[in-house]
Amino acid sequence: MTGLAQRQAAFLGAILDDEAPLPTGWGDERAPGLAIYRNNYRTSLMEALRSTFERTERLVGEDAFRRAAAHHCIMHPPRSWTLDLVGKGFPETCTELFTHDPDVAELAALEWAMHEAFVARNTKPLTTAGFGEACAKFTEGDWEDLTLTLVPDLRVVGASHDLVRLWSSLAADRAKPDVVPCGEAQCAIVWREGERPVFALRPAWEGAALDAFQRGATFGAVCAALIETLGEEAAIAEAGAMLARWVGEGLVEKLAQGVVASPAVTPLSPFASDSSLSVR
Amino acid sequence: MSAIAPFHGFGLGLRRTHYADFLEGEVDVDFVEVISENYMVEGGKPLRVLEQVREKHPVILHGVSMSIGSAQGLDEDHLSQLRGLADRIDPLWVSDHLCWTRTSAHNSHDLLPLPLTREALDAVCANIDRAQDALGRPMLFENPSSYLTFPEDEMAEWEFLSEMAQRTGCYLLLDINNVYVSAHNHGFSARDYIAGLPLDRVRQIHLAGHEPGEIIIDTHDRAVSGGVWELYADTIAQLGPVATMIERDDKIPPLAELLAELELARSLGRGNAGAIAA
Ligand SMILES: [Fe+2]
């Protein structure tokens, strides 16, 4: 390592770790300057986390959030050039730290998904008319082999709590969080409508289906998994309705066929009806 | 490497709280400067806003993450994304800071000071050559504010900047507040510093507010101080007209307040030194 590289490694080490001794050759007169750099580092990460996870902070309170954020920055010091990624992994940190309150990590995961969706690549989703035209001449085999390219802003987040109620209840400071467990397994799907990230609660099997399509599964494979979860009759009705709903919501970018190997789709989670709440 | 022609005018940094002012109204500025990294994203609102602002005003891309002083060289992903943004926006110029922000292991997301050694100068010059090559254009580099110096320093910061500009063909972004802050913190003369710079390489000036104290902190959260205005007036008397802007990054006031402050810079630019007392 060159002298400069050594100097930079020691300096950054001293910024990251409050307890680190002053780098070699530094007298105490440099301690106040180092303290300013340490403070700048902590403040900028903390502010980045606070702005991305504003509702999570309201849910747990400022002190608990500060501790969680500090823990996150110590365990996962930033590596990327962009401050936008400082919050990557923070939902997992919340899972570790708030073991008895799974709603905290769920809300953090939702905020992170909204944060990512905000600046995802722009696309022109398939319109309902375009979709109708494309599949007008589909044979049964075409349906079987159909794969979907979903829009790049789409995210699926697990939800064991009513995240719509929780989200709305934390819209302003000093709000009282409304934490209500879901009866059945749910998920929140996040996407961007124009420039605004939005989300809606859906049954967990719908999230699993989106996830399977994102990994390249065919419509045939997803339907087979749905049948195992919902039974044949319900699965056939739901599969078509679900696809039409996604197209209507602008979640599908394009259709394709003839993918050679579709990844295996495991049975999807239990069906919970009448759960399509949206906060759009 | 092509040259950057001087551009004379007065501008402001584009901040999110003022998006509507810039999109919906006619703001009296000659250019706007944006933090490049805020727009180095794949899509969505920030890029759309920047493109619309660009239709109304010349734009300067001012970066904070190039880490031109890193011993391990530049981040190629950062460079290629910056190139993409520059191609899209066609800015007046692209700038960053004389500093380092990261090692190969971690990123501080802060503008850290460099030891002023020949070794650091060689590393900086090699990195600037790479950056200018990757961007296909010369860049501006800004003098930093700093809170400590290194025992191994071999030269003054203005000597470092002079040789850097001469060796790489880059230009300088002179932050008058940073000179003022560092001069106070490290006990040198701000006027000697400016007199020691190759002023013909300066294409832009930054003005900003700081927090006074035993160590002055470069906070950008308040109005430009009287001492900085005086130093600015002295500098442009030597330099002539140069693109000048006010940076406010925290406790951002309504746009009208910043425009009023910019008016003082314009007035000083017309040679009206009496404006400072007003
Ligand atoms: Fe500056």
Image: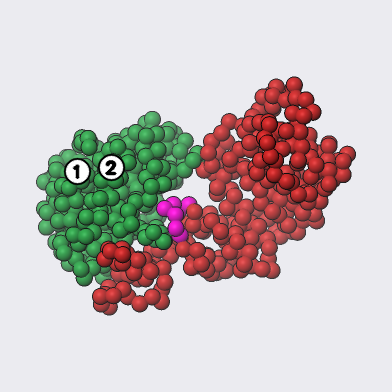
Chain colours: A red, B green
Where residue B62 sits: x, y (%)?
33, 45
The reply to whether the C-beta atoms of the residues labelled 1 and 2 are less than 8 Å apart is yes
| Marked residue chain, label 1 | B
> Magenta stretch: dominant SS?
loop
Q: Is residue A83 magenta?
A: yes
Tell me the magenta residue range. A78-84
Q: Pointer 1: what residue? A: B169
> Where's the N terminus of chain A, which quadrant?
bottom left
**B103 lies above or below B200:** below
Q: Pointer 2: what residue? A: B132
Which quadrant of the view contains residue B184?
bottom left
Instruction: State the SS at label 1.
Output: loop
Side of B163 where A203 appears, left or right: right
* Residue located 77% across and 29% down the image: A141
Where residue A2 sits: x, y (%)?
28, 64
Looking at the picture, tell me which residue is in the foreground, B197 or B161: B161
* Residue located 57% across and 52% down the image: A112
Side of A36 where B17 appears, left or right: right
* Residue located 68% across and 31% down the image: A258
Q: Is mark 2 within 8 Å of ligand 1?
A: no
Looking at the picture, tell me which residue is in the foreground, B218 or A176: B218
| Marked residue chain, label 2 | B
Looking at the picture, tell me which residue is in the foreground, B69 or B141: B69
Q: Residue furthest front?
A: A260
